Image: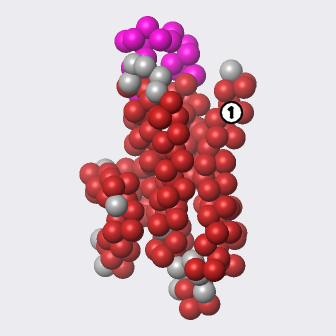
Amino acid sequence: MGSFLKYLFQIILSPAKGWEDVAYDLDERIINVRHLYLHAFLPLIGICSVSAFVRLLYGANDMLGCTASAIIGFVSMFLTYHLAIYSMSSFMPRFVDKAAAKKQDQRKLALVVMMSVGFIALVILLANVIKVQLAIIQFLPFYVIFILWKGCGFLGVEPRQEGLYMILASASVLGAYYLLNFMFNALV
């Protein structure tokens, strides 16, 4: 989990340099995407979801509300990852140049989505442990758009296709998360 957090914080603090380092480590076979998914990403979204119980200390919520919030948070992030992978993999061949299309690697797409959803998980963790509601925290997930934009070079997106890629990738990650979160909260 330490290496995943190292890459995630590097991408958050300096997305262009972070994606270069991730690309280098992926090419050198230092990064095992499956291992990161199972041993870093899933525990991260689990920990961030369980952080909803911190609100019990503040008296902001009851046990049932915290349990529902934790379950909804985990399921929303888990499904967002898989829906974003599915939707982005269907439109990515149109956005990469022909040379990159031949060597298109699903691992890169999985890492971009994993880092984006990982950032959303950290924002949820921050929102859960801070006692007061700050408006800036509600807007932090939109930084994912910047992370996705800086990941264009990592994925091999053609420069003339970046705008359309950004719209579809942002809708795949942020749209899926907010839609799922809204739907599950409406059910509770």
- Quadrant in the rendering for residue 183: top right
Which corner quadrant holds the C terminus? top right
Q: How is the image coloured?
A: secondary structure
Residue 171 belongs to magenta span: no
Magenta segment's dominant SS is: helix
Taking the image as shown, residue 131 lies to the left or right of residue 173, namely: left
- Seen from the viewer's position, the closer of residues 81 and 20 is 20
Left or right side of 150 for 68:
right
Relative placement, left or right, of 37 versus 149 is left
Q: Is residue 41 visible?
A: yes
- How far across and how far down the image is residue 10, in percent? 32, 58
Q: Is residue 56 toward the left or the right of residue 183 in the image?
A: left
Residue 59 in magenta? Answer: yes
Looking at the image, residue 37 lies above or below residue 31: above
List x then y, in percent, for residue 90: 70, 69
- The residue lying at 47 percent from left, 23 percent from top is 133
The vertical placement of 180 against 109, above or below, is above
Span of residues in magenta? 50-68
Q: Badge 1 local density, few (<14 within 10 Å), some, or many (20+)?
A: few
Q: Residue at x 67, y 61 (%)?
A: 167
- What's the residue at 59%, 31% (across, down)? 72
| Image coords of residue 82 (percent x, y) | 60, 54
Confirm whether residue 89 shows in the render.
no
User: Can you tell which quarter of the image residue 50 is in?
Assistant: top left
In the image, residue 168 sits, relative to residue 40, either above or below, namely: below
In this view of the protein, which residue sits in the foreground, 39 or 48?
A: 48
Give the secondary structure at mark 1: helix
Check disc 1 and report the residue beneath it. 182
Q: Residue at left 47%, top 34%?
A: 137
Which amino acid is tagged 1? Phe
